[in-house]
Image (spheres, rainbow, N blue to C red):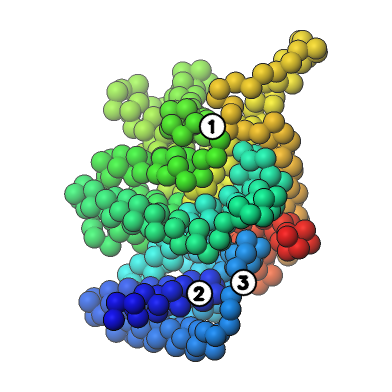
Amino acid sequence: MARRPRSQVRGILRLPLLLLIWGVFALAMWVPAIHATIVNDHQTSQSFFYAGIAGLMIVTFIGLSVANRVPRYGMPGQLMTLLATFVFLPLYLAIPLQDALKNTSYLNAYFDMVSALTTTGADIFDTPSRLPESVHLWRALVAWLGGLFMWIAASAVLAPLSLGGFEVTTRAEPGRSDAILHESHRPDPRRKLILVTNSLVPVYAGLTLALSILLVLCGESGLVAVCHAMSIMATSGISPIGGTGAAQAGLAGEMVMFLFLLFALSRLTFSSDTVAVGHSRLDKDPEFRIGLLIIVGVPALLFVRHWLAAFEVNASDNFAMAFASFWGAMFTVASFLTTNGFESAYWFSAQEWSGLETPGMILLGLAVMGGGVATTAGGVKLLRVYALYLNGLRELERLVLPSSVSGEGRGNRRLQSNGAFVAWIFFMLFALSLTAILILLSAFGVPFEEAMILAIAGLSTTGPLIEQAGQVPIELTLLATPAKMILCFAMVLGRLETLAIIALLSPNLWRS
C-alpha cells in the first residue's frame, strides 16, 4: 500500500512544469480566502476560493489528458516554462483580484499580478486603504512565491545554461550547458529541479517565518509583519501600509529587516548549490564584499556631505540627528541596492542632513546595479559590476605597463578569463533594452523623465522607484493601455534578463 502513494507522487511530478506551477498558485488562493473568512470579508473569500477551485479543476483535467504521454524534459523547455509562467500565469492570477475589487479593470489587475510575480512591486492602486487586507496578503504571497520560483530556477535552470549571471563564472557559452559537451554526464533536468526545490523551500520558508516572528516581537501587527517578511525575502517592496514609514515596529523593525536584506547580496548567504569554482566562503565572495562596501560607503558620503557642501542646511549637529540620518541612508541604500525598494522612516532626515536635492538619481543608480546573482534581486547584478571593475583596473594597468601580464588572483577565481567581456555584452544589452523601452513609452505620451524612471523600475524590478525616484509620484492608472503593456514586457524582461530571451531564440539551444 505504501508504493501506491509514491507512484501517485511520481505521476504528479511527471506533469508539465507549467501545470505544476499553476496548481501551486491555485492552492495558494485559498490562503487569502481563509484569511478573508476570518475577518468576515465573505465577498473576497468567495472570489479567491472559487478561483482556486476552478484552477485546480483545469489543472486536473489537463493532467489527466496528458497522463499517458511520455514526457521529454530539457533545459530549453524549462527556460520556456519560465517565460510562459511570467507572461500567462498572471492572466489567471488576476481573475480573483479583479473580482474581489470590483472597481478596477482586468488590465490593471493583470499589471499588478505581473508586477507581483516578477517581484517588481509596482503599485498600480492609489492608496493601500483601497484594498482589503486579504488582497494585500494575496499580492505579497504572489511576490513571495515568485521569489521562491526564481531561487529554484537560478540553480536548476539558469546555472546549467550559463545564464542569469552565471555566464560570467562558467566556461560554457551563454545559453549552452557544459553538459551538452559531455553527453554521458548530462544530468536529468527534472531530477535536479526536484532536488533543488527540496533543499531551498525549507530555507526560504524558515527565513520568512523567522523574520515574521521577529517583526511581531518588535511590535508590528500580524498581517503587516507577514507581508513585510515576504516582501523582504522576495525583494518585492509590497506593503499593506505603503512602506516602513507607517510601521509600528519602528527602528528595531528596520534593523531586523536590514539583516535579512543581506540575503539578496549573495547566493552564498543561504546556499552553495551554484558554486562551481572559486571560494564558497562568504567573506571571500566578491558580491557580498562589494555590496557591503556600497551599503556603507554611499551613506558615509552623504553623511560627510553635511559638512563639505551643505552649509545651508538648517539642521542641528546633534548625535540623534546624525544617527538618524546615517541609519536612514544605510537602510534605504541597502533596500534599493537589493531592488526591494523599502524607504526608511529616517530617509527624510538623511536628505535633510546631506542637503541632497536629487536623491532619486542615487536610488536609480542603486537599482540598476542590483543585488547578487541567483537571488531574488534584479538589476545588472553585483558580480557583473565586479567583473567590469576588475577589467577597468587591468586596462589602467596596461596604460602604465603595456607589456605586463596579469595573473589570476585568488579573489578572482570565480570569474572566467573573458568574464568582463560577457558582462560588458550584458550591460550593453541592458542599455539597449532601457533605450528601447524609454522610446516606446515616450511614443505613447509619457514624459521623458517619467519614462526613464518607469523603464529603470521595470528592468531592474524595483517598483517603488515609480513613487520615490521622481519629484512627484507617477500615477500608473493614468497611463495609456499600450504603456501599461510595455511596462509588463519590461518587468518580464528584467526578471528573465535579455540573454535568456536571446538564448530562447537560438536554434542551437533547441537543437542540442
Report the mark closest to the observer, 3 or 1: 3
Mark sitting earlier along the chain (2/1): 2
User: What x and y, as percent, mark residue 294?
Assistant: 50, 30
349 sits to left or right of 312: left
Q: CA distance from mark 3 to mark 1?
A: 34 Å
Q: Report if the CB atoms under discs 2 and 1 are less than 8 Å apart.
A: no
Q: Earlier in the sequence, mark 3 or mark 1?
A: 3
Residue at the spot x=30%, y=42% of the render?
A: 256
Is 317 located above or below residue 362 in the figure?
above
The percent coordinates of residue 266 (x first, y second) are 47, 40
Mark 2–mark 3 distance (CA, rounded to whole Å): 9 Å
- Residue 278 tag number: 1
Q: Residue at x 45, y 78 (%)?
A: 11
Q: Please tell me how crowded label 2 is: few (under 14), some (14-19), or many (20+) other residues with Cα within 10 Å.
A: some
Q: Residue furthest top?
A: 401
Name the residue carrying label 3. 72
